[in-house]
Image: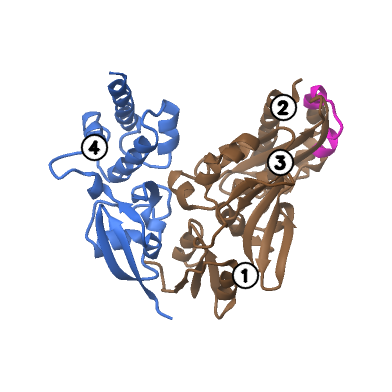
Amino acid sequence: MLPSPFEFDRPSTIEDAIRGVGESGDGMFYSGGTELLLAMKMRVIHTDRLIDIKGIFGLNRICLNEANDIEIGARCTHAKIASDPVIREHVPALSSLCANVANIRVRSVGTIGGNLCFGEPHADPPTLLAALNARLVLIGRDGTRVVPADDFIRSELETIREPDELLTLIVFPCPNGPVTYRRFKHGERPSVNVAMAWSIDAGKATIKGARVRVGALGSRPQPLKVVEDALRGLPVREVRSAIEAVLTTALDELEVNEDRHGGADYKRHLAGVLLLRNVEEAISVGGGA
Amino acid sequence: MTHMLPISFWLNGQMIALDVPTHTLLIDLIRDKLGLKGTKRSCDMEVCGACTVLLDGEPISSCTMLAVDVDQREITTIEGVTPPDGLSRVQKAFVLHGGLQCGFCTPGFIMAVTALLKATPHPTDEEIRHYLHGNLCRCTGYTKIFEAVKSLASEQASENAI
């Protein structure tokens, strides 16, 4: 048994869900419960009412839209994203990431939206979604707002989402260059992870732009600006030397929390190793050099 | 507003209909209310796999699933995959290969392997390891469990070859 009973609503529309969560007392949206129920068991979260969003049509859709953006409904499970043909074709790194979140049971029911909304620093999806320049669609009483993934997680277990706002959709441009993701983990959650997305020119010889994010190191995914600047406009064959030249500076600028996953120097070192492995993969799959 | 909800679901092929408090976890419903003690509680945080049951054929942690959430769905527990006159082929393989010692993790492993073989009848070594990495065993060191599953994968492959 969980510590105390609660009301359990099963709305069938987004409007009803938002109305239901804001009624009285502390209502919360609920889907897989893989994070929320754990927190309720540990008595760190209490709720008077769970609003089950699994009956709302359309929140588990994945598609490539007419604007060449990939849309992922917030209540898609990790297992669904891992096996989705659109994701496999256009963002295999995300497919692989989702195929390795936690374990098979968590992937069966846990959702990507729930993962983001929990704001756990040691999580896989936020880092890659930030590198993909994803936008998150939040619907609340006062309308819809779209926020960059970079701004969504504010700090440890804290996001900018208001309690009565529902995360409905994750949208990002269909990549036109290599997207890579590497994690290191001892157990279920990543100790450190690094995601990288390049946009490449038509000849596949030059990097037009790069987004690099390091996660699980601090309280939220962080950009490696120094590396991004070094990669912009760079011929792919010069990538290795360019990154090696700035790597120490780039890593020194990261905020690092020492925790049970390791000390600051160790975690910073891991970030560097993972970045270089990302680079090797990006060169081999997309760069052509 | 009530804190009790009516649910009906299939449990090992039998239709169950009852009212449950909203904060009841599936494992407590299965073990305490319905008396099926094969499903084990261990870590209570979705890490160890001892409480694995199948929800519409997919493995889930019954320790972290609300009972109200199985309404209109199908649950399979270790009791549901055990034939009345003996053991299933997955269970037999675990016995034959020494894939269990104390036995506490075994029901969870059997459920996970059952789901794996249904989805992927001939898993590769890598697929077996990937699928089962979230089930913990403190006795066997996993080698014997892996051999048991591998025997099933190749057994099925050779059956199909004939």
* Label 4: which secondary element: helix
The chain carrying label 3 is: A
Chain B, which colour?
Answer: blue
The chain displayed brown equals: A
**Residue assigned mark 4:** B91
Q: Which residue is mark 3?
A: A174
- Tag on residue B132? none
Q: Is residue B77 positioned above or below A39 on the image?
A: above
Q: Which residue is mark 1?
A: A163
> Callout 2, which amino acid?
Gly
Give x and y (percent) for residue A187.
50, 43
Q: Secondary structure at mark 3?
A: loop
Report if residue A9 is visible in the image.
yes
Region rendered in magenta: A227-240
Label 3 neighbourhood size at 10 Å, few (<14), some (14-19), many (20+)?
some
- Seen from this angle, which residue lies furthest top? B162
Residue A286, numbered circle: 2
